Image (cartoon, rainbow, N blue to C red):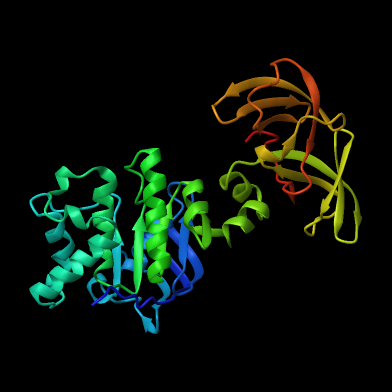
Amino acid sequence: MSIASQAAPIRFEGVSKRFGRDVVAVDNIDLAVDAGKLVTLLGPSGCGKTTTLRMIAGLEMASSGRIIIGDTDVTKLPATDRDVSMVFQSYALFPHMSVLENVMYGLTFSGLGKSDARSRALQGLELVGLEDFHGRLPSELSGGQQQRVAVARALVLEPQVLLFDEPLSNLDTKLRRQVREDIRAIQQKLGLTVVYVTHDQEEALAVSDEIVVMRNAAIAQIGTPRELYDSPNDRFVADFIGEANLIACQVVALNAGDATIEIEGYRLRLPARGLSPGPATLAVRPSRIILDNDTGVPVTVAKATYVGVRMEYTLEGEFGQVFAVKDDVDKPLEVGISLYMSFAAEGPVLLPSETGGHGGH
């Protein structure tokens, strides 16, 4: 008997959630999660991502719209009637029960005999690499191990959908990387449908098939990690996914889908993305800034910081400040020197100009 997945797709059709008369937590969103995919809801605090997750689980009820899991309209179904498991931030393990008893807990309610429940729980622990710890109490495990017990407990129920609410926020950096790799490996091995909530961009980029960036109770953009990183729709997405410098520029000419832009006399040609001549914004990742050419935009090194694997620089020009990184830690640039900044061929993206804010990151 092995743990199987009956992964199901999820559909949101015009779903809103209001608390009282004034607070709109989720505002008329449409969303499709394919079966067997890991989709992350990413955004700052208060953007609606956790409320969206709780509506899938049935822990919050939609105020309007429809939620469909597989072929079933679950909009009005309570959490107990949905084939969904959730892994919480707090792990929620029973301190007085052994690891094995914690993992078996949900199975005993599902009408499974004790020996079947035990063997399936042991399989769940094997999946997360903790079969040798089945007799221990949660207090005898590290934070990362406790999180994996919580994952095993959710997996053994063989849900159609597995939900994660900020599952790594209680772990230190090194463990976070390990546990997120574990979660991704299990999800792919079993073909699970997973919806994962985080505010950590790197975590989202690392685990997701698709990322849903949320802002102010609505969806700002949906795409693969690479699509969002390389082609953000607007300033918010550019800045939220992996730090972008936002530099004011002018579109001075258009030609066959390309735009020629100008920043302080330096010209660059790149895809126009539907923009017209006039003011625009150039979004550039810190790693896409080149500092060893003899042409470009004049800048001064305002700050240089050594962080071990790379140098981080704050550069100042007439446009404002930008943040750049360079892998060369052996010959750092000195603070105060003037040089030219140009941009890698791949990476800089044109965005519509929005009022307020130049440069920065």
Q: Quadrant of the N terminus?
A: bottom left
Horizontal and vertical percent position of residue 135: 11, 54
Task: Tell me the quarter of the picture where residue 88 sits.
Answer: bottom left
For this view, does 253 lie left or right of residue 32? right
Say if 276 sits above or below 342 in the image. Answer: below
**Residue at the extreme front of the image, as rendered:** 132
For this view, does 334 lie left or right of residue 263? left
Task: Tell me the quarter of the picture where residue 10 sits.
Answer: bottom left
The mark total stands at: 0
Residue 23 makes an appearance in the image: no
Horizontal and vertical percent position of residue 28: 49, 67
Task: Work out whether residue 228 or residue 59 is closer to the camera in this orientation and state it.
Answer: 228
Task: Work out whether residue 183 or residue 322 is closer to the camera in this orientation and state it.
Answer: 183
Q: Quadrant of the C terminus?
A: top right
Say if 355 sits above or below 314 in the image. Answer: below
Horizontal and vertical percent position of residue 282: 75, 44
For this view, does 179 lie left or right of residue 133? right
The residue lying at 51 percent from left, 70 percent from top is 30
The residue lying at 65 percent from left, 26 percent from top is 313
Residue 30 makes an appearance in the image: yes
The residue lying at 26 percent from left, 48 percent from top is 145
**Residue at the extreme bottom of the image, as rendered:** 71
Task: Work out whether residue 327 or residue 202 is closer to the camera in this orientation and state it.
Answer: 327
Horizontal and vertical percent position of residue 280: 78, 46
